[in-house]
Amino acid sequence: MADVDLRPMSLGEVLDRTFTLYRNNFWLFTGITALPFLVLLLVNVGIAAAQTAKVASAQVPRGVVPPSAGMIGGAVAGFFLFMLLYLFLLGAAQAATVFAVSDLYLHRTPGLRECYRRVGGRALRVVVILVLASFVVGVGFLLLIIPGIILFCRTALAVPVSMLEDSKAIRSIERSMALTKDYALQILVIFMMVWVVTSLVTAIFQFPLLFFMFNAARTHQHLPFGVLFLQHFASFVSQVLAAPIGTIAFSLMYYNLRVRKEAFDIQHLMASLGTNPAPSAPSVA
């Protein structure tokens, strides 16, 4: 492990290493990310099929049967159960991606199954972190726009912190605030890069379907099931391709800031030589 390249990186180096890791381990990262979006794809396709069948049956004259309270309650309960499952899987995928980046950064060989195995019940913790961080950022936006943006950037490393240091949700957010102190602008640049890449990938896959969507809107007709399927499948592909990039970048930024602020490179070297250095005390934001 002595050959691990642990050194402070500039923002440009963090971004360059992000795309290098993504390109060299494309199938690993997309395989990890595919799970939650595959579930979402199946549900969307099922809804599209039901809507298509409903439109076809509406053309047959019959009495209108209003939905019962039980049907409405079942639909609401099903929606919330699906959202809980989707958020759990999304958290698991994000956590597994963090572990994959960590292994690659420290010159270990990760596997898709191994990364998910290490997640375990921590996926629920990721969901809690995302909810708490969203609440904190939302309060910042209610006060003024600028504090909201700053808090958005300062909490960006909470998930890598929680997974790699095995810390609870609130502690992970506090630790992220400490690590990102004086580096919020660099985090904002990463967020902007992720947004640009996601927008471009989505536009590339959705653009061929715009003709059918505009034509259906112009003629006041429903989209056929085949077009709806392609629309959801294009969304699935674009999400799988773009989603890992931000998590990779923030995981690398976590290690970069630990090297800069806490001499993680020296700690790791001493640990690899069989020495147990006293951990450096984290700074307080």
Image (tube, grey):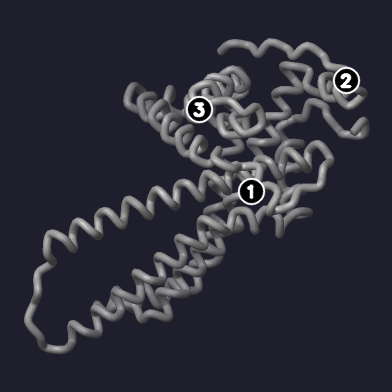
**Which residue lies under the disc numbered 3?**
169
Label 3 or label 1, whichever lies nearer to me, is 1
- Circle 1 crowding by C-alpha within 10 Å: few under 14, some 14–19, many from 20: some
Mark 1 to mark 2 CA distance (whole Å)? 29 Å
- Circle 2 crowding by C-alpha within 10 Å: few under 14, some 14–19, many from 20: some
Q: Residue at x 43, y 24 (%)?
A: 146
Residue 26 relative to residue 154: left or right: right
Q: Quadrant of the N terminus?
A: top right
Residue 120 relative to residue 227: left or right: right
Helix or strand or loop: what does disc 3 sit on?
helix
Q: Is residue 23 above or below residue 8?
A: below
Q: Residue 125, labelled with which disc? A: none
- Circle 3 crowding by C-alpha within 10 Å: few under 14, some 14–19, many from 20: many
Q: Is residue 199 above or below residue 71?
A: above
Q: Residue 270, labelled with which disc? A: 2
Please state which amino acid type lies under the numbered disc 2.
Met
Ranked by sequence position, the earlier of labels 1 and 2 is: 1
Disc 3 + disc 1, Cβ < 8 Å: no
Where residue 159 sits in the image (x, y, percent)? Answer: 57, 34
Mark 2 to mark 3 CA distance (whole Å)? 29 Å
Residue 113 relative to residue 78: left or right: right
**Which residue lies under the disc numbered 1?**
116
Disc 2 + disc 3, Cβ < 8 Å: no
Hey, which quadrant is residue 238 in on the image?
bottom right
Please state which amino acid type lies under the numbered disc 1.
Tyr
Please state which amino acid type lies under the numbered disc 3.
Ala
Where residue 69 sits in the image (x, y, percent)? Answer: 12, 59
Where residue 85 sits in the image (x, y, percent)? Answer: 43, 51
Hey, which quadrant is residue 262 in on the image?
top right
Ranked by sequence position, the earlier of labels 2 and 3 is: 3
Q: Quadrant of the C terminus?
A: top right
Disc 1 + disc 2, Cβ < 8 Å: no
